[in-house]
Amino acid sequence: MKTDVLVIGGSATGLVAAMTAKSHYPDKSVTVVRRDEKVMVPCGIPYIFGTVKTSDNNVLPDEGLRKLGVTIVIDEVLSVDKANKQCTLKNTDAITYDKLILGVGSQPVVPGWLPGTGLKKVFTIQKSKTYLDQLQQELEGCQKIAVIGAGFIGVEVSDELVKIGKDVTLFEILPHVLGQTFDDEFAVEAEKILASRQVKVVTGIGVSALLGDDAVRQLQLSDGTLIDVDAVILSMGYKASTELAQAMGLEINAFGFIKADQYRRTSAPDIFAAGDCAEKVDFATGKLSRVMLASTACTEGRIAGLNLYGLDTYSTFKGTVGIYFTFIGDTGFGVAGLTEKQAQSEGFNVVTGTFSGIDRHPGKISDVHAQTVKLIVSYKSGVILGGAAIGGKSLGELVNVIGVAIQNHMTVHDLMMTQIGTHPLLTASPAGYPLIKAAEIVANKLRG
Amino acid sequence: MKTDVLVIGGSATGLVAAMTAKSHYPDKSVTVVRRDEKVMVPCGIPYIFGTVKTSDNNVLPDEGLRKLGVTIVIDEVLSVDKANKQCTLKNTDAITYDKLILGVGSQPVVPGWLPGTGLKKVFTIQKSKTYLDQLQQELEGCQKIAVIGAGFIGVEVSDELVKIGKDVTLFEILPHVLGQTFDDEFAVEAEKILASRQVKVVTGIGVSALLGDDAVRQLQLSDGTLIDVDAVILSMGYKASTELAQAMGLEINAFGFIKADQYRRTSAPDIFAAGDCAEKVDFATGKLSRVMLASTACTEGRIAGLNLYGLDTYSTFKGTVGIYFTFIGDTGFGVAGLTEKQAQSEGFNVVTGTFSGIDRHPGKISDVHAQTVKLIVSYKSGVILGGAAIGGKSLGELVNVIGVAIQNHMTVHDLMMTQIGTHPLLTASPAGYPLIKAAEIVANKLRG
């Protein structure tokens, strides 16, 4: 089989890369090769346990690909011969291509130093529907569940498992949950909400072993404490999947990602890499970054797809701005760009401003939620380096406003002059719009 | 009495101007003069009828002013002698000032050509709490209510009155409700939702007279049709309140607003005007504009307050971007910048892109809502001139993302490279984020 554009990987990156390639170069044939018949919506995976109940309610539709005329091949890639531009598959004929996009994603970290990860009832959160269905079934008989690692996935899975009546303990070696993503005052709020939802949170101590004969029975903390468990979920981060790229002889960076420039071109001609598997540099510093996000993956997939046959679109993509959010109970937590801690450790002289108010107005509106915005600003230039927010149902888009401000290099002075829309049933009041008020607080500090 | 900074007007503009002035110039004394003991949250006024039940739940708090040490004087301004910098009040001693900010707002239009507006049971939507309380009380005995004028206020008041069981007919002379703010395809959706909520919508025909002896009894349409009514609410627009400014000898522009530059300085030294009473120019064209919004008023109040004693903040405020939204039933409608119709009538060669999806993902999330974004883009430059959206509870902040993009002169190409955050419970999927997808559609048209 022959295709002009071959995309390996069917998750967010592959989907967007293929759709973009086909829309932008309609005369080219585009083929996606992926392993799974049904692909999970990646960020929806934690929600299969409670909110949407089953992985069948979390399938990424193929409709967009099919409508555009993208060919889908369900198979496993064995190897790619980049000199002859040929991809060998396990069950079907080899595919020759002109341009190749690798969107092969990432896989859960299972730390080699942790004894007992091979025991039964020890799971990770993988993207395979088959694996997740089996995980969900096996958890049915388990009551006491330990989740190890309190990043977004660990927090979301924990919150979902208590929704279905499990006894969940969330372990985090850092002083706070979400500690790599939020400054402490935000992380502490997240912990309070988790606690109120009956997730037991244990922070500041590591897990040193998983114990049991056949299945895991106990978990040992670094101080020797033993805790009985029926199952363990490891959510200790993800690593880029680079086996194929390494076998192909592509360059891999110091953080273990496939090297790729801002147009997502790898070290080899006609081969692009995007999403979790591909190199990231930080928007603020240009340094290598480890941020993996479905939304970033989509942006990168789009960039790869656009620039396959020439750089006709000048890339204004200057690196990754991590824009994350989660929703715990009825409270959203979000961040865009650098936290105060991160900015300081990079050497920025920062000034911050935090404003707390409400996300609807007046306060007597029924679904009003407390809302806080913190801005992290470069002292000398006034440029916004990052922002974090807590809020209700509009928290996500509020953080996106911050994200767009960061990507436009806006200063706090610009932000103070920025016009926003407000409405009683949809936002904070115009006099108390948190982003502008936080900018005011920073501007007053800069002047003082 | 003597004050450094005198602010006349206690609504959104006055509040923000005074707070900004006092925060930015803490050594200066700041005084606000306003007529009303209690000030209404302006955009919350339509919601006193149903959602928050009483005007007492819609009061703008004085706490922010008091905390900062701003003096509040409740009185009526009789005149201002700008040569001697003295403001004469009805009940209290005159106030001398160094800098003056006029934030005197706007008032409902009562058209002189419409007979019968002086009858009892004919109301407007004013900002005075006393007036609104009386209106609410008088409506108690009325069942058949005609609302004339289907801008945001007319639409919101109608939707609120059906919530409390009134029989409401909404009249609009334009072909569609919200016809000055939205392109037709959005307006039609708003009409459908109003109809489903039992608001009778009558468009494309004018009202020629209000009839009755003492109180209004009937309404006559321009085709002679007579309609029985118990009360009429006129929501036919607002005009800048400029009586005081005119008496002071300040310049008034051709649209009837107090002339003011981008720092909100009027034609007289040391006098600023901001909010509904002050000149607006359009962000895209620099032409005079009639847009009046609480959010814009707050931005202007902030600019006036910052620049009282010298322009130490370079103003990036280059004119008004109208950013509006409303919420009808459970559906939000919003717009930022120019509509397609407006852009075309200005002479822009435009290309548009509309994408429809959902505002949570996957679609099985319980509070998912349909979501549509339309982008209006300048053909040659690719610059985003405007956007409109329909959605659920995060619609407001989504439209703010568009507003910030417009104010940063982003192009569709920039937008396609923009990183956004996404989350199942808070936003659309990253592969279907409506703003980026609409940008893609436009970019494909531009290329084609």
Image: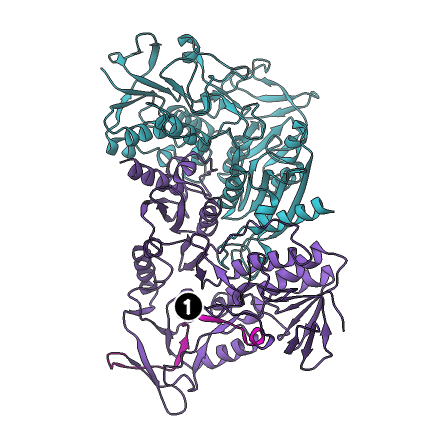
Chain colours: A cyan, B purple
Residue A119 visible within the image: yes
Count how many numbered circles sit on residues in the image: 1
Q: Is residue A344 left or right of residue B438?
A: right
On the image, numbered disc 1 is attached to which residue? B163
Q: Residue at x 44, y 61 (%)?
A: B289
Name the foreground residue: B206 vs A446.
A446
Name the foreground residue: A367 vs A211.
A367
Up/down of A328 relative to A22, above or below: below
Q: Residue at x 29, y 69 (%)?
A: B203
Asked which secondary structure carries label 1, the reply is helix
Up/down of B380 relative to A136, above or below: below
Residue B82 lies, in percent from the top left, at 66, 72
Residue A198 lies, in percent from the top left, at 59, 40
Q: Is residue A378 left or right of residue A271?
A: right
Question: What's under tag 1, amino acid-wise?
Answer: Lys
Q: Is residue A12 left or right of residue B29?
A: left
Residue A232 visible within the image: no
Q: Residue at x 56, y 52 (%)?
A: A369
Which quadrant is the N terminus of chain A positioned in?
Answer: top left
Residue B185 lies, in percent from the top left, at 29, 55
Using the rendered view, name the quadrant where residue B273 is placed: bottom right
Residue B358 lies, in percent from the top left, at 37, 44
Magenta-colored stretch includes residue B229: yes
Q: Residue furthest bottom?
A: B213
Q: Residues within 10 Å of mark 1 (few under 14, many from 20)?
A: some
Query: Could you tell me which chain the residue with mark 1 belongs to?
Result: B
Name the foreground residue: B375 vs A357.
B375
Using the rendered view, name the quadrant where residue A266 is placed: top left
Magenta-colored stretch includes residue A447: no
Q: Which residues are magenta?
A: B222-246
